[in-house]
Amino acid sequence: MKIPLFLSGVACLLSTLPGHAQTVTVRDQTTRQPLPGCTIYRQHPPASTTTDAKGQADFAPFRGADSVFFRLINHQPVAYSYRQLLTREFRVDLEEDNISLMEVVVSANRWEQAQTEVPQRIEKISAREIAFQNPQTAADLLGSGGYAYIQKSQQAGGSPMLRGFATNRVMIVVDGVRMNNAIFRTGNLQNVISLDAGSVESAEILFGPGAVMYGSDAIGGVMDFHTVGPRLSTTGKTRLTGSAFSRFSSVNAERTGHLDLNIGLKKVAFTSSLTHSDYGDLRTGSRGNAYFLRPDYQERIDGVDSLRVNADPQQQVQSGYRQYNVLQKVRFKPGEAWDLEYAFHYSATSDAPRYDRLYLKDSPGRFTHAEWYYGPQKWMMNRLGIQHNRPSGWYDRLRLVTALQHYEESRHDRRRGSSQRRNQVETVRAYSFNLDLDKALGESTRLFYGAEIIHNRVGSSANRAHIRTGETTAAGTRYPDGSTWRSYAAYASLKHNFTPRWILNAGSRYSYFAVDATFDTTALSLPFTTARNRHGSLNGSLGLVYKASETGQWYLNGATGFRAPNVDDIGKVFESEPGSLVVPNPDLKPEYAYSAEFGTAKTVGSFLKVDLSAYYTLLDRALARRNFAFNGQDRVEYEGETSQVQAIQNITRARVWGLQAGTDLNFGKGIKLSSILSYQRGEEQSENDLENYPLRHAPPLFGSTHLVYERKKFKFDAYAVYNARVDYGNLALSERDDSAPYAKDANGQPFVPGWYTLNVKAAWFVNQHLILNAGLENLTDQLYRPYASGISAPGRNLMVALRGQL
């Protein structure tokens, strides 16, 4: 025993001699990945440093210290003596800490800020959790967090619902650029799947109106995605990092491959990412309401649309698709003050069947459509970001982001027995300019302010093609071709600390927007040929935070939000459902939201964390689709069919209220329990009888509970996801009318059965470079269809993924 002690003492003595360099490495206890940004310090004499991108730091300032402290957000702090670190070979493993309020968020003021200073609920999904959950799409990524409800009309979809609002009443932001465009509609959207879940570094959901920072559409909340960025070398040597993974899922024969690579020099860095996914037809469960099965389908055989019996009704025939994503970023940092980054995003899907239209039948029980599919959904973004960090008279930090986005989507449908396929193609060219500035006004006050300019140009074309000869004829376009939507805005937000415990947040924004459109009246006679819509909107927010301590927070917030009419609202012509035709209405005004929120969060030691928020939102002059008089008539002939005329109108009011709650327990020894619950109720006023009816985008009670065991190199998660029942009387009027996706109760009325799934996932971190993931989802093979969805949920699914990292 004396010899090892003697050698240890000699090693310690040698390590303290001048010229002997010593480096400490900080890693995640479970994943074995390096942890950059960890603060290392001693108190007597004082010294501190932080770990670099490799999780390493020079340990020379801490030689001989009695206590060296290691602290990193979302990890449990530890302290070691120099002698203890010597025996550990200067390796420190930190355990993830979910019992903490010390989170840093960006979405509240567009700059990094402590979450405890924000008077709104924000949920953050980390890269660590994304990699463990292995979501197939960005919509699934949002749903994995437990607070966003995801609707799907087809497998190639995912429309998030936040606090009773969805589609063009919630905002999608990618690297500081709004994804919402001039043709975002009130119907369910699929745009979020254009983002590659494999390239997302973190995601935040800001709940409630975010109009001060983000403008129109941010009523229910903001989904703020941050994609992987280039990392510079901090050692003077070329920094090469990257990862690759391959994933298989049995429920839809998913085959996904992903590769990303980072090359970092001292002042220049490059990041590339590529993902390809192939999704087969989705298989649903076996235990549940048989209405959700696929007993038959239609196929064209020898030139005839023919009915086929499905040999396996659990297989949702005609639901598969493919997708690929490309990301390229270049970063240039010429000095300490300037930081420039260019990013290129590109995404494209294959043709994607509109599944909820392919099982529609007429009264004799015949399929209404032989074909209904979306053409490739394409999204491209070129983004240039410039940041300057140097205090001046006008700002301490400045960020300029300019972007050009191009969207393309198309719809193709053919009725059963028809030889004519209708093709509609839409494009949007979106230019944006964002200037954000941050300025300290003394020790207690900080000002965030900026400006935004947006310009969208919409292209729309249509034809009818003979499926045998290919001959085309003109058809009515969905939107007025060449129409534009523009917005100009300025904002300011102030954060003031009255005391270290009391914090005031206040903000205001003025937006001016304009829509111009010229209509082609060839296919449909209109009483106008142009539309010119101009409006301004003033919005504000006021919030107060009380930080009882580092372990407790209370907040109260009031805010307004708005949605400006876009080209989809004002100029669209489309068949919303068989027998209903939506026509343009150029006289629309913005709808306004008035919201209040109260919340609290508290931790008890390292054992318990609880959080709760309650909210209420009133939507005034709400834009809604209703029956409409057109040229003095409520019915018109269009595309050979007599249809009820409808239009978007400022005709109703809506209100939503609810609760969101979360609990985290840490039992020690790697055992943790977490639970999330969301309850929301929404009502919409009927313009006919002034009665209140359930709101369409307010989903039923939903939540999840996770039991996690996590130790060195291993993580196991057993969890349940659950959803309450919705009876016919609690369905929105629009859902009662469009009842095909819903099961029928004993009276033949549509309803949503309650459901739950039991699931397990595990990860084995073989070493720093190799990770094996596996999961078994929907263990009991439940057969169900989530609220408002048109496709049944996945049945029992085996997922296996292998990831390698440089």
Image (cartoon, rainbow, N blue to C red):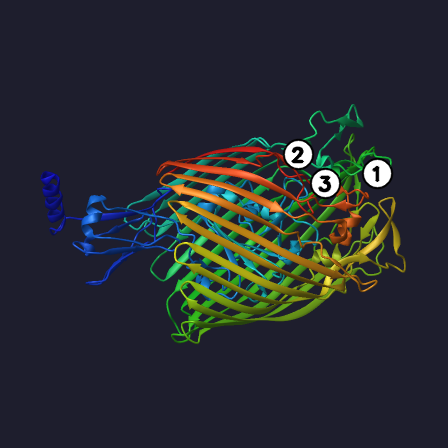
Question: Which amino acid type is shown beneath numbered disc 2?
Answer: Arg
Query: What amino acid type should be assigned to the residue bearing mark 1?
Result: Asp
Tell me where residue 792 appears, x and y as whole percent.
67, 39
User: Is 12 on the left or on the right of 701, as rendered?
Assistant: left
Quadrant of image for the C terminus: top left
* Dot label at residue 356: 3
Marks 3 and 2 sit apart, C-alpha to C-alpha, by 21 Å
In the image, what residue occupies the spot 25% across and 48% down? 24
Residue type indicated by callout 3? Asp
Q: Point out which mark residue 75 bears.
A: none
Residue furthest to the top: 302
Q: Nearer the viewer, residue 246 or 69?
A: 69
What mark, if any, has residue 287 been given in the picture? 2
Q: Nearer the viewer, residue 11 or 598?
A: 598
Q: Earlier in the sequence, mark 2 or mark 1?
A: 2
- Residue 143 appears in the picture as rendered: yes
User: How many neighbours does mark 1 have within 10 angstroms: few (below 14), some (14-19), or many (20 or more)?
Assistant: few
> Residue visible at 51% across and 55% down?
123
- Disc 3: CA contacts within 10 A as few (<14), some (14-19) or many (>=20): some
**In the image, is residue 84 above or below residue 772?**
below
Dots 2 and 1: beta carbons under 8 Å?
Answer: no
Residue that mark 1 sits on: 362
Left or right: 501, with 206 as reference point? left
Q: Is residue 22 visible?
A: no
Q: Residue furthest right?
A: 632
Which one is earlier in the sequence, the residue at label 1 or at label 3? Answer: 3
Q: Upstream in the sequence, badge 3 or badge 2?
A: 2
Mark 2 surroundings within 10 Å by alpha-carbon count, few (fewer than 14), some (14 through 19), many (20 or more): few
